[in-house]
Image (cartoon, grey):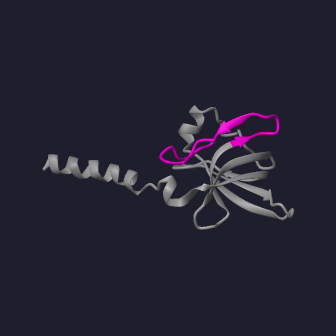
Amino acid sequence: MKFALAIVVALIGTSSAFAHHSFEAEYDDKKPITLTGTVAKVDWMNPHIFIHIDAKDEAGKVTRWMCEGGNPNSLIRAGWKRTSLKAGDEIVIKGYRAKDGSNTCNGRSVQFPDGRKLFAGSSSDGGPQQ
């Protein structure tokens, strides 16, 4: 009985790993995008952070984008702090567009006005590196 219970617990613990999406399922590596704009908000949560940015297109129209980043623990190890981005910060995000055409991207890097860059990639399982 204890052995069966241990197997069930192990399977439940790994089910979320199988349910987790891959880069290829949601994003198109043939559609790189560069967004320049102002941070509206940052959702610092598991399993991935989301950076909401108001970016201008070529015509000057401002559009809200939601860019997926890595998980908080990985980002902290890559040099991020919870306070690295604040509403009102001007940034450039490089990443890849969502396949569904929404204003969503997989953020690969964030650049600050002073030239600093932070790796923001949420996917190491197929997304090209920038």
Residue 40, image x, y percentages: 76, 55
Magenta segment boundaries in residue numbering: 110-130
Quadrant of the image occupied by residue 118: top right
At 86% from the left and 64% from the top, the residue drawn is 59
The question of residue 119 being in magenta is answered with yes
Looking at this view, is 24 or 10 the one in front?
Answer: 24
User: Is residue 89 found left or right of 99 in the rendered image?
Assistant: right
| Label tally | 0
Q: In this view, does 82 lie above or below 31?
A: above
Residue lying at the far left of the rendered structure: 1
Q: Name the residue at the front extreme.
A: 30
Q: In this view, does 38 lie to the left or right of 4?
A: right
Where does residue 16 sit, x and y in percent of width and height?
Answer: 39, 53
- Where on the picture, by quarter, is residue 129? top right
Residue 71, image x, y percentages: 54, 44
Foreground of the two, 78 or 124: 124
Of 32 and 88, nearer the camera is: 32
Q: Confirm whether residue 38 shows in the render.
A: no
Tell me which residue sits at (57%, 42%) in the image.
72
Query: Would residue 102 appear left or right of 87 to someone viewing this image?
Result: left
* Residue 16 magenta: no
